[in-house]
Image (spheres, helix red, strand yellow):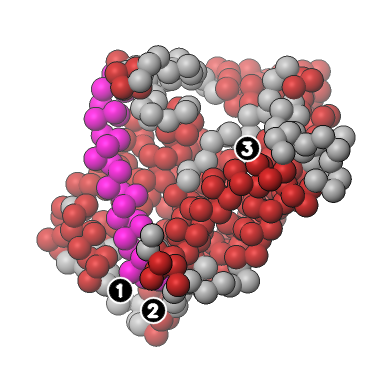
Amino acid sequence: MDRKSFMRWRAEWLDVPMLLWCLWPIGQWIFVSNPEPQPWIASLYLAGAWGAPWMLGRIYFCGRDGGWQLIAAIVAGIAVILPIALIEGAFGPKFYEWFYELHPFRWDGVERYVGFRPLGFFEDGNQYGIWVTATALAGIWLWHTAPNSRLRDRLAVVAGLGLAIALVSQSVGAILLLCAGLALCWAIGRSLNRWVLASSVVPMVLAGTIYFSGAVPLRALAEKTVIGQQIVDVFRAAGRGSFIWRMARDQRALTLISEHPVIGAGVWDWWRPNGERPWGLFLMIVGQFGVVGMVLAFGSLLTPAMRALKRHWYASAWHQPAVPLAVIVLMAIADAMLDSFFFYPAILAAGALVEFPIDARRSSANTVASPPIKARRAVRRVA
């Protein structure tokens, strides 16, 4: 109903990949004989699940003011997550059944090294893990960039709670992504670190390509070689057997994906002949929508995030909300490689990054960019 805000929206070239992603099921119809669901339904679903958050980010959270408000809103979620973390961390999943019924996946990976990983109202504990770690990163950034010492002291408590919740989740993969995200934020403005990070991307992309292409028979290596068996034993001894389990499911799905690699099968349960689906969201999308759909889906999020980091790679840019928003997008995409679940505010963040000023480049390296008036109010409410 907010027509005034919608009228301010102006299309950018970065909107095109998201538009094509939402329309891809209709284009895919040319190559798929019996799609399921029908292309217009699949397209409508993508428009609601991906396109709508993107547009909300474009309209309401673009610019420094909107970026601060989005980060403050993410951090405010700690108020809801905290009681869930305290109760379910000690006693296991409870909240969902108190409000609805027994959660169908309530014991799926919730037992951790100490106590339980909370589940709350999420679909899976892995989704909870990436949610709380992304929230922790936003809280740490909000504390570090507070415009005055009094507000910084209060936000230190908020950031500490967010970090504690993330660590208590014991979601190892998500915690590693949090560490990588903080390291990336710390590297902003350091030319040497920029080259180090850029050079580290090449082996990561190469490893991902090998993993998802099936060019190297990882499953056979793990089962039939001494080194592979030793690696599997190490992971299991460390309590990370689920990582090997996920990789095995993904590798078994590659045979079916190879039948329609570019265009996709066009059916949601393309994995049914295997009796199991892959665990990673990447492969779920590739199986149904092909490599084309995967590139459009994640490319629409990755492009504005990478452009924002490139534009804000200078000493004082750490204080610009574009930096943590871009890092959160990267964290969500990386998590989707081995998890079926997504941190939906990352779509809002990617949409917000399409239009982001870089006026802070004119400021000195020692200048802290204070949030605009509306954003200051949002930050104070969080504190």
The dominant secondary structure in magenta is helix
Callout 2–callout 1 Cβ contact below 8 Å: yes
**Residue 351 in the image: x percent, y percent?**
50, 61
Q: Residues within 10 Å of mark 2 (few under 14, many from 20)?
A: some
| Residue corresponding to mark 3 | 281
Which residue is rendered at x = 30% and y = 77% of the image? 367
Is 316 contained in the magenta span? no
**Distance between the alpha carbons at the discs numbered 1 and 3:** 37 Å
**Residue 176 in the image: x percent, y percent?**
48, 40
**Distance between the alpha carbons at the discs numbered 2 and 1:** 7 Å
Which residue is rendered at x = 48% and y = 43% of the image? 343
Disc 2 residue type?
Ala
Can residue 85 be seen here?
yes
**Residue 344 in the image: x percent, y percent?**
48, 46
Can residue 180 be seen here?
no
Q: Which residues are magenta?
A: 62-90
Asked if residue 369 lies left or right of residue 265, the reply is left
Callout 3–callout 2 Cβ contact below 8 Å: no
**Sooner in the amino-acid sequence: mark 1 or mark 3:** 3
**Distance between the alpha carbons at the discs numbered 3 and 2:** 36 Å
Q: Nearer the viewer, mark 3 or mark 2?
A: 3
